[in-house]
């Protein structure tokens, strides 16, 4: 039974080393380096993408600011309408419309305005774009720091798997040694049972270590923003990190952090944007110049094509009656009479009237062109301008104070990470010495038990001490690597 468990554990632990059994993953390479993990995270991490998406809007804000400065706004509109026949009264006067009408119209307007705020907008928009870029750089630096820390966690968990596997192999050897000594009467059954218990505990420890690797890989995939494969063990991490003595100078690191830390640079850019906003608010005291121009036209057509013809006939009939009356009552003797026969509609005239009514929807009657130029200067706005200027100046000062606070925090972070790195490196050396001593102690205890001068309990104690020393060495090693990652995040760039 235990042999089957061991075989299953070893199969899980070595699945990542069997290329022929690895399925091809669509999104995550099976051999994953740290830089590849960071690149995948930059493409897929949702939190980082939310920050990176802000750049598109900031770029369009810059374009819009320049377009408001140099390009007028143009508006176009059109309409269609219908009015039925009937009468309406206005100021006791009744207007009668004998036929329904259909109408259409268009208008084209051009507007351009120049003011202090318009002049200040391009600079403000560019400052805000720089602040957005700096914020994205800061998010990228934080993302890389998080991916690096989790990448190290996976490697550390895999080191623990190797330690657990070696402990299982050693306990298998101790069990065989205890059984052999029991067979020749040099050990008791208690030694055999203790060896069996130790082997079982090693099996459980190996299972837990393999499970820890899977959990840490799942967390790495989550930070990368990519779906984890069904079997995370098919992805192997390829980067290794040697332990070398740190040779960085604290003064140089502080200078680099002052110039390159993305969080400080983002706050500096936002402070510059706040100062630009304060300057833009002061431009409200300046006059503004506006220019507008417009073109328009309309159509109006009677739905009854003979309505205008009938009106023309009625009008000419009235005019002819008046003409005949004038010839009879007002004509002076000897003067020629008026030619009333001219006051009549010919078929061609009627057709011309019908053709003139056929204008809907696009035979527009143009209206006169209009244009205006206006200069305005606000004199008193109930202290609104001073209040807005004071508020913008306060925000600019607050932003500068945030820069100073962050600079102090970064200096503290860099110094703390630097001294922590030195201590971690010294701890690695100490744990290496402890590990060698524990290995020698285990070797001596094994030999003593083998020749019968030591007890199995002494052997178990030495093994436990060696196991603890190995685990402490692994933890110290990855504490050193994490200290470097923390220092790199504080400085704002890679140091290796």
Image (cartoon, rainbow, N blue to C red):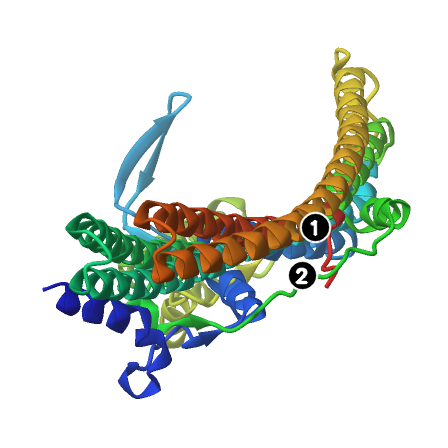
Q: Which residue is mark 1?
A: 425
> In percent of the image, x 83 and y 37: which residue is there?
116
User: Residue 174 at x, y = what percent?
Assistant: 30, 61
Identify which residue, 197 or 132, lies in the foreground: 197
Which corner quadrant of the image does residue 265 belong to?
Answer: top right
Q: How many numbered markers are drawn?
A: 2
SS category of the residue bearing label 2: loop
Give the label on residue 253, or none: none
Q: Is residue 283 above or below residue 357?
A: above
User: Which class describes the residues within 10 Å of circle 2: few (<14), some (14-19), or many (20+)?
Assistant: few
Q: Which residue is mark 2?
A: 243
Q: Quadrant of the N terminus?
A: bottom left
* Residue 257 seen in render: yes
User: Which class describes the residues within 10 Å of circle 1: few (<14), some (14-19), or many (20+)?
Assistant: many
* Residue 482 seen in render: no
In the picture as drawn, the residue positioned furthest to the top comes out as 382
Identify which residue, 111 or 495, lies in the foreground: 495
SS category of the residue bearing label 1: helix
Which corner quadrant of the image does residue 60 belong to?
Answer: bottom right
Query: Is 195 placed left or right of 328 in the picture?
Result: left
Q: Quadrant of the C terminus?
A: bottom right
User: Residue 108 at x, y = what percent?
Assistant: 59, 56
Identify which residue, 29 or 495, lies in the foreground: 495
Identify which residue, 457 or 122, lies in the foreground: 457
Q: Is residue 484 above or below residue 423?
A: below
Which corner quadrant of the image does residue 414 belong to?
Answer: top right
Query: Is 38 placed left or right of 313 in the picture?
Result: right
Residues marked 2 and 1 touching at CB (< 8 Å): yes
Query: Is 303 placed left or right of 3 in the picture?
Result: right
User: Residue 375 at x, y = what percent?
Assistant: 83, 36
């Amino acid at each position: 039974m235990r042999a089957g468990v061991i075989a299953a554990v070893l199969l899980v632990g070595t699945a990542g080393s069997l290329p022929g059994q690895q399925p091809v993953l669509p999104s995550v390479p099976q051999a994953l380096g740290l830089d590849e993990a960071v690149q995948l995270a930059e493409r897929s991490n949702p939190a980082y993408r939310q920050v990176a998406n802000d750049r598109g809007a900031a770029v369009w804000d810059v374009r819009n600011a320049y377009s408001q400065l140099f390009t007028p706004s143009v508006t176009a509109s059109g309409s269609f309408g219908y009015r039925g026949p009937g009468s309406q009264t206005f100021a006791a006067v009744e207007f009668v419309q004998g036929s329904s009408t259909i109408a259409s119209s268009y208008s084209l307007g051009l507007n351009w305005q120049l003011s202090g705020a318009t002049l200040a907008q391009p600079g403000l928009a560019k400052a805000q774009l720089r602040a957005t870029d700096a914020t994205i750089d800061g998010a990228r630096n934080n993302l890389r720091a998080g991916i690096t820390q989790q990448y190290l966690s996976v490697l550390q968990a895999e080191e623990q798997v190797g330690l657990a596997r070696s402990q299982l192999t050693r306990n298998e050897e101790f069990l065989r040694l205890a059984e052999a000594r029991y067979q020749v009467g040099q050990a008791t059954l208690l030694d055999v049972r203790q060896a069996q218990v130790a082997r079982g505990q090693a099996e459980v420890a190996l299972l837990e270590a393999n499970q820890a690797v899977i959990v840490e890989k799942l967390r790495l995939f989550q930070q990368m923003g990519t779906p984890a494969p069904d079997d995370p063990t098919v992805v192997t991490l390829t980067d290794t990190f040697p332990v070398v003595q740190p040779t960085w100078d604290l003064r140089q690191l502080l200078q680099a952090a002052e110039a390159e830390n993305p969080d400080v640079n983002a706050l500096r850019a936002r402070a510059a944007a706040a100062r630009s906003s304060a300057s833009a608010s002061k431009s409200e005291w300046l006059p503004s110049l506006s220019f507008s121009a417009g073109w328009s036209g309309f159509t109006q057509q009677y739905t009854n094509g003979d309505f205008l013809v009938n009106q023309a006939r009625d009008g000419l009939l009235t005019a002819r009656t008046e003409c005949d009356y004038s010839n009879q009552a007002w004509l002076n003797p000897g003067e020629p009479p008026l030619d009333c026969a001219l006051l009549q509609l010919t078929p061609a005239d009627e057709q011309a009237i019908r053709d003139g009514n056929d204008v809907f929807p696009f035979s527009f009657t143009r209206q006169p062109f209009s244009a205006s130029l206006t200069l305005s200067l606000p004199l008193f706005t109930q202290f609104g301008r001073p209040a807005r200027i004071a508020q913008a100046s306060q925000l600019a000062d607050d932003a500068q104070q945030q820069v100073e606070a962050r600079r102090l925090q970064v200096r503290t972070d860099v110094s703390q990470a630097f001294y922590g790195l030195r201590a971690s490196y010294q701890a690695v050396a100490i744990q290496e010495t402890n590990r060698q001593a524990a290995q020698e102690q285990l070797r001596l205890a094994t030999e003593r038990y083998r020749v019968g001068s030591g007890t199995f309990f002494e052997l178990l104690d030495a093994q436990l001490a060696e196991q603890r020393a190995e685990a402490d060495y692994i933890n110290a090693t990855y504490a050193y690597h994490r200290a470097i990652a923390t220092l790199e995040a504080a400085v704002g760039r890679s140091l290796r």
